[in-house]
Amino acid sequence: MVDEVLSIINPKPNQTFLDMTFGAGGHSREVLRISPDTRVIALDRDPLAHSYAVELQQSSESTVLPLLGKFTDIERLASDVGIQPGTVDSVLFDVGTSSMQFDTAERGFALSRDGPLDMRMDGSRLPDQPSACEVVNLLSENDLYHIIKKYGEENKARKIANMIVESRYAYGRIETTQQLANIVKSVFDIEYKKDKMQRHSHVATKTFQAIRIFVNNELNELSNGLEMVHRLLKPGGVCVVLSFHSLEDRIAKRHFHGINLEDEPNMSVRDHYRNSKIAHSMDAVTQIMEKCWKPYSKKVITPSDSHCKENPRARSAKLRAAYKLEVNKYNI
Ligand SMILES: C[S@@+](CC[C@H](N)C(=O)[O-])C[C@H]1O[C@@H](n2cnc3c(N)ncnc32)[C@H](O)[C@@H]1O
């Protein structure tokens, strides 16, 4: 959805564009093609993606500032290169894994390629960050259940967590993506099932997604990152979030539109309203969040049918955008 993203960002000379997910630099390069005099700040937590941003900086006539770090490092990193709060014109989060990460078996993201169970977007640069291997082998059955249920929205989470722990006892450490895929597969009678969009997806897809989200703390990163970029944006500046699954889209929606209790998983609206104290505090949170952003559109933007035919992977893409309102309520 590059065209949609660019038409919302609408880059102009002397403006500052913050690419929070540089990856292979597809979006940043398009911004510079349209507007070479836009300054691009290129963040990524992945050292390989960062090296591409450095290459772009060295080969381009434009101003490119490569930053290595996570969304939640952005205020510190931006300040280190002289970017002050309230000075950025546009921001893009194109969240999820890049094809460079997914297609490299050694990174351990893909269940279709056998590799070590790793899944760390930062590679090994942060010594304290656990890999997928440590998560799968060291966490309790109950913790694994919660991760697979919450981040994978997997109905068979309980059985899968149990099977992982049984396999650890029976066969020792689970080291590879194929071992984990086979353990999950043994809980199902089939290898592939149809997803909501009637595609055939491997039965371990949701479990892999859940573990990846946990390893990289992806949902907290996005939520806290949105608060930080709000402070960096100018009033009237725009933030775009392009996501590929519902958990991330829900976070963007919460920030840009406020909380809709009807949308909250595992949460009964009636239960909340039974306790008026909670209902009151939820109302207050909603109001504060709504005053931070003015949504670009009421509804989520999805790719056209023709776009999906050209690029089937884009089918689950969801785009939301919002403008920063004058008053920054996050600062109170
Ligand atoms: C889908 S790719 C972006 C592709 C990019 N827009 C392009 O056109 O090439 C997502 C990128 O975001 C990075 N990423 C994901 N979560 C991040 C986080 N919390 N902090 C920094 N980078 C992150 C990943 O490392 C990955 O390179």
Image (tube, rainbow, N blue to C red):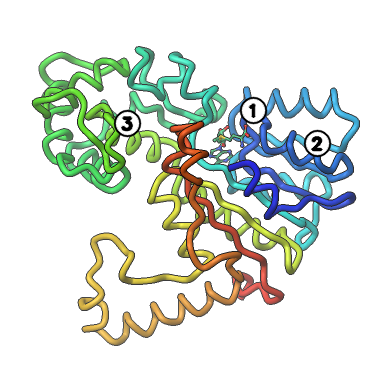
Disc 2 C-beta below 8 A from ligand 1: no
Q: Quadrant of ligand 1?
A: top right
Q: Mark 2 highlights which residue?
A: 33
At horizontal 21% and vertical 76% (from top left) the residue drawn is: 271
At horizontal 27% and vertical 29% (from top left) the residue drawn is: 200
User: Considering the image in quadrants, where does the N terminus appear?
Assistant: top right
Front-most of residues 129 and 83: 83
Q: Could you tell me how far apart the alpha carbons at marks 2 and 3 are, in whole angstroms?
A: 36 Å
Dot 2 amino acid type: Arg
Q: Give the percent coordinates (x, y) of residue 39.
A: 83, 44
Q: Mark 1 highlights which residue?
A: 24
The number of discs equals 3
Q: Could you tell me how far apart the alpha carbons at marks 1 and 2 are, in whole angstroms?
A: 15 Å
Q: Give the percent coordinates (x, y) of residue 262.
A: 31, 70
Residue 208 image label: 3
- Circle 1 crowding by C-alpha within 10 Å: few under 14, some 14–19, many from 20: some
Q: Earlier in the sequence, mark 1 or mark 2?
A: 1
- Circle 3 crowding by C-alpha within 10 Å: few under 14, some 14–19, many from 20: many
Q: Give the percent coordinates (x, y) of residue 30.
A: 73, 37
User: Considering the image in quadrants, where does the C terminus appear?
Assistant: bottom right
